[in-house]
């Protein structure tokens, strides 16, 4: 068969396989793969647990990944697409996606799932399941939920969409509220979801403004600690949670905080709210939550009630996972999470 004929046939087949998902996410179902791929959830869990055992940071990266996938074009795996000569600026190349990681964990899960149930499970669903398992493992099971599935993988991914839709760490409270409201998330949910910053790391370039912020916004000894660490390289990373800090740096800059350090890093709980009220958080966007009455009220509420945060964070992640693809957009079950099928 001539190459041009093969190309034409493949293009037709790919077009036929492109499906149209329901716009509102109403087609999503808990246990969606029960009949078609019964062990998908245990496969995902196995690989997430393995990745977290090797490096707890990959758990934090998976919790961030669901947010960065779902807030841009809905939960469609568009964040996973690698740049290609035809589309060199996919979402993951956007500056706002700095530090986004764990793509290799998603690849490993997808390969295992394909070996069991070829062409059945979308990468978008894998992102959601993996975030669920990561959040559960990092919180010792306190964060737990049963997300519906049945998402399709999108075929579009553009850095400009990520820049437009994702919040920046320099945002004011008004900008944060507007950004979340655009996706139908409330001020309370903004506060709840920001609690994910109890885990993981950030680049110094993402917190530059904090290094010169006044004492009303950041505890000066914590600011000195961050400044010292940020002076140590081109753009190093620092833990989002002060309790995950390196003891030597804390002893030098911030000895009163030594007692707060924990052996178990990246533990997902409501400590973000305690740190925030004490003005010991990394991003300007975190501190901004203290500057508006309703948001501040919720910061205090979640500082006081860790169990409530575990539950509300679980619910907010389920809501996040239901953000639909843009109306009329086509989807598919990708063969490989980094590339659309017709690539
Ligand atoms: C409210 C607006 C938000 C802003 C402005 C924001 C901003 C950021 C920034 C700048 C970083 C560090 C990136 C880097 O420099 O490497 C980061 C990390 C992180 N964010 Fe957010 N974020 C927000 C909301 C969220 C939400 C809703 C989640 C999840 C539910 C989340 C989860 C995380 C996690 C887990 C990390 C650490 C990732 C890692 O260690 O790999 N963030 N965020």
Image (cartoon, grey):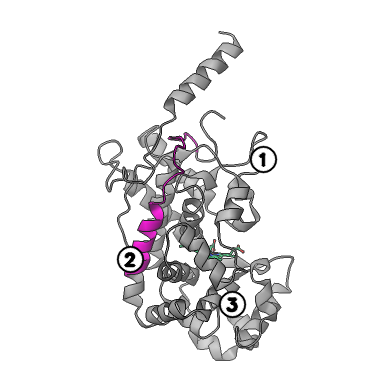
The CA distance from mark 3 to mark 2 is 26 Å
Mark 1 is surrounded, within 10 Å at the Cα level, by few (under 14), some (14 to 19) or many (20 or more) other residues, namely few
Q: Is residue 46 above or below residue 227?
A: above
Label 2 CB less than 8 angstroms from ligand 1: no
- Residue 280: image quadrant is bottom right
Q: Position of residue 162 (x, y in %)?
A: 58, 52
Q: Is residue 333 magenta?
A: yes
Give SS at disc 2. loop
Q: Position of residue 63 (x, y in %)?
A: 46, 59
Q: Is residue 257 magenta?
A: no
Instruction: Kindly identify which residue carries mark 2.
Output: 141
Magenta stretch in the rendered image: 311-336
Q: Decide which of tag 3 and tag 1 comes sooner along the chain.
A: 1
| Residue found at x 31% / y 38% | 37
Point out the frontmost of discs 2 and 1. 1
| Residue 56 shows in the view | no
Instruction: Kindly identify which residue carries mark 1.
Output: 88
* Placement of the N terminus among the 4 image quadrants: top right
Instruction: Kindly identify which residue carries mark 3.
Output: 246
The CA distance from mark 2 to mark 1 is 39 Å
| Residue 162 shows in the view | yes
Give SS at disc 3. loop
Q: Position of residue 190 (x, y in %)?
A: 45, 68
């Amino acid at each position: 068969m001539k190459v041009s004929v093969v190309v034409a046939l493949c293009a037709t087949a790919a077009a036929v396989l492109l499906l149209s998902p329901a716009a509102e996410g109403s087609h999503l179902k808990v246990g969606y793969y029960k009949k078609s791929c019964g062990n998908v959830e245990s496969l995902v869990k196995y690989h997430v647990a393995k990745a977290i055992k090797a490096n707890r940071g990959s758990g934090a990266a998976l919790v961030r990944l669901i947010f960065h996938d779902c807030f841009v074009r809905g939960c469609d795996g568009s964040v996973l697409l690698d740049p290609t000569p035809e589309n060199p600026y996919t979402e993951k190349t956007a500056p706002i996606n700095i530090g986004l990681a764990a793509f290799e964990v998603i690849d490993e899960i997808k390969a295992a799932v394909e070996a069991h149930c070829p062409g059945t499970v979308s990468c978008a669903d894998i992102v959601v399941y993996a975030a669920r398992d990561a959040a559960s493992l990092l919180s010792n099971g306190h964060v737990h939920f049963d997300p519906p599935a049945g998402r399709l993988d999108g075929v579009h991914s553009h850095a400009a969409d990520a820049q437009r839709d994702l919040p920046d760490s320099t945002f004011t409270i008004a900008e944060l509220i507007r950004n979340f409201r655009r996706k139908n998330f409330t001020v309370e949910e903004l506060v709840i979801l920001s609690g994910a910053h109890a885990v993981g790391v950030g680049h110094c370039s993402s917190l530059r403004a904090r290094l010169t912020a006044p004492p009303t916004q950041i505890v000066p000894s914590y600011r000195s600690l961050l400044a010292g660490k940020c002076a140590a390289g081109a753009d190093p990373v620092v833990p989002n949670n002060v309790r995950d800090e390196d003891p030597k740096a804390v002893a030098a800059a911030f000895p009163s905080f030594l007692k707060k350090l924990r052996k178990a890093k990246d533990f997902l709980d409501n400590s973000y709210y305690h740190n925030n009220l004490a003005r010991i958080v990394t991003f300007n966007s975190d501190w901004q939550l203290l500057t508006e009455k309703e948001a501040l009220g919720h910061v205090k509420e979640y500082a006081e009630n860790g169990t409530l945060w575990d539950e509300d964070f679980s619910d907010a992640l389920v809501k996040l996972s239901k953000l639909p693809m843009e109306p009329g957009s086509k989807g598919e079950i990708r063969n490989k999470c980094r590339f659309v099928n017709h690539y």
